[in-house]
Amino acid sequence: MRAPTGRFLWEHLDEESVVYDTRSGQTHLLNALAVEAMLRLQAGDFSLRALAGELATLCETPANDAFRADLVALLRQLSDLGLVERVDGEH
Amino acid sequence: MAAAARAGALCYRIGPFQLTLRSRLAQPARLVHRLYGDCEVLEPSGQINDFHLQLRRPRTLRRWLRPQVEFVAEGATPFSPLPVESAFPMLEWGLNWCVATTAHQFLMLHAAVVEKNGRAVLMPAFPGSGKSTLCAALVHNGWRLLSDEFGLVRPGSCEYVPFPRCIPLKNESIDLIRGFAPQAVMGPTFVKTRKGDVAHVKPPAESVRRADETARAAYVIFPRYRPGETARLLPIARSRAFMKLCTNSFNYEIMGAAGFTTVAGLIRASECRLCHFSDLDEVLRLFDTLA
C-alpha cells in the first residue's frame, strides 16, 4: 500500500487530524492511528505485515492476527476514501 | 427610503454589499424603511451594485383569486410566488439566496456572529439550536451584531466581516424576545409562512454604524437550546468543530483548498465549545465571561 504525496493538506488538532484531498475536494476526519498509517504510507510502500509491525510497536501491542485484521479494515476504509492506494501486484 | 423604493429604485448598503431594490408594493417598502433605516442609502445612478432585486406581482391568472408576490434577482425568479403578505420575508430570504449563491469572495459559514471587546463569537446554525433567539438577546445586551445568518470570512483571514441584517425570529421566540428585550425594534409577525410564524428584529443602529469594522475570531460556540437545562459550556474537540464548520458552510466545497485553510485558521484562532442553555439571563451571564 502507499499514500500519495503532495495531494493532501493537513491540520493536526488535538488527537485527531483533518485532511483535505485536493484531488477529490473532500475533507476527512482521521484518528491518530489512521494518521500514523497514512504518514508511513506516504514515506514509502509498505507490505501489510511491515506496516502492522510498525504500528503495533507504536500502539505497544502485539502485531497478531487480530491487530492485522483491524489494520486491514482501517486500510480498506482509507482506500474507499481514496486516501491510500494499492501498489501494483498487491492483493 | 420607502418612497424611493416605491418610486423607482432604492440603493442601499448592508455591510460589504450594495443592492438596488425595486418594488411598487407598499408593505415591503415601509418595512425596509423601518428595519433598515439606519443603513447607508446610496444614489441610484452611477453605482455598481452587487444585487439588483425586485419584488413584483406575478402576472398569472391566479392574481385574480389571491394576490401574490415574486422575487426577482438579476432578472431571474428563483422561487415560486408567495402570498403578497409575505413580501418582506421573501425579500429577506431572497437576499440570503443571492449572497449564498454568489458571494464567493468570502468563505460563508451558516452562523451568527456577535462581538464584544474585540472578540468575535461564531455560533453555527443547526436546527433547534436557538441561535437566532440567543443572537437577538445578545445584541440587545451589549454585544455587537455582525450577522445572524452569515459568518463571512475573506480567504486566509481570521476576521469576520459584518453583514448586519434583520434577525428573523420564529414562533415562540417572537414573544420571548419581545418580553426579554422590549427595546428591540421588531416588524410585524407574519403568520403561517413556510417557516412558521416569523418576525424580524431590526439590527441595532450601533451595529449598522460599525458595519465596516471586522472582528477577530475568538470563539466558536455551538448553541443548543435544551428546555430546563442550566446554561453551561462544554468541551468539543477542535477537530470535531472543524468538521461541523465545513458541513455548515454555504460554499466550503466551492472554495476548495482556500476553504480548508481558512477554516483551519479560524479553528486555530478560536476556543471551541458547546453551549447548552434554556434561560436567556443565565446564558447571557455565561457569554459575558467570554468577552
Image (tube, coloured by chain):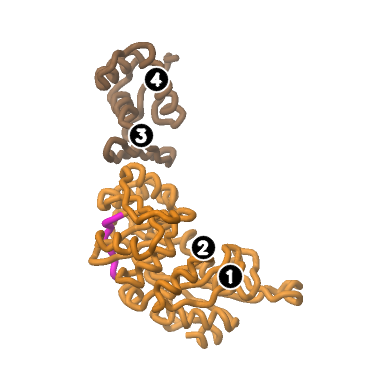
Q: Is B254 in front, or is B29?
A: B29
Which residue position holds label 2?
B97
Residue at figure coordinates x 39%, y 79% from the top left: B183
Please identify the dominant SS of the magenta region: strand
Q: Secondary structure at mark 4?
A: helix
User: Residue A30 has which mark?
Assistant: 3
Which residue position holds label 1?
B72
Which amino acid type is shown beneath numbered disc 2?
Trp
- Asked if badges 4 and 1 are on one and the same chain, I answer no
Residue B16 in the image, given as x and y percentages of width and height: 37, 69
Q: How many marks?
A: 4
Chain B colour is orange
Q: Which residues are magenta?
A: B213-219
Which amino acid type is shown beneath numbered disc 3?
Leu
Is residue B186 left or right of B27 when viewed as pictured? left
Residue at figure coordinates x 64%, y 69% from the top left: B82
The image shows residue B48, relative to residue B44, as above or below, that is above
Q: For the residues carrying marks 4 and 3, which lies nearer the camera in this image?
A: 4
How busy is the neighbourhood of tag 1: few (under 14 within 10 Å), some, or many (20 plus)?
A: some
Is residue B127 left or right of B274 when viewed as pictured? right
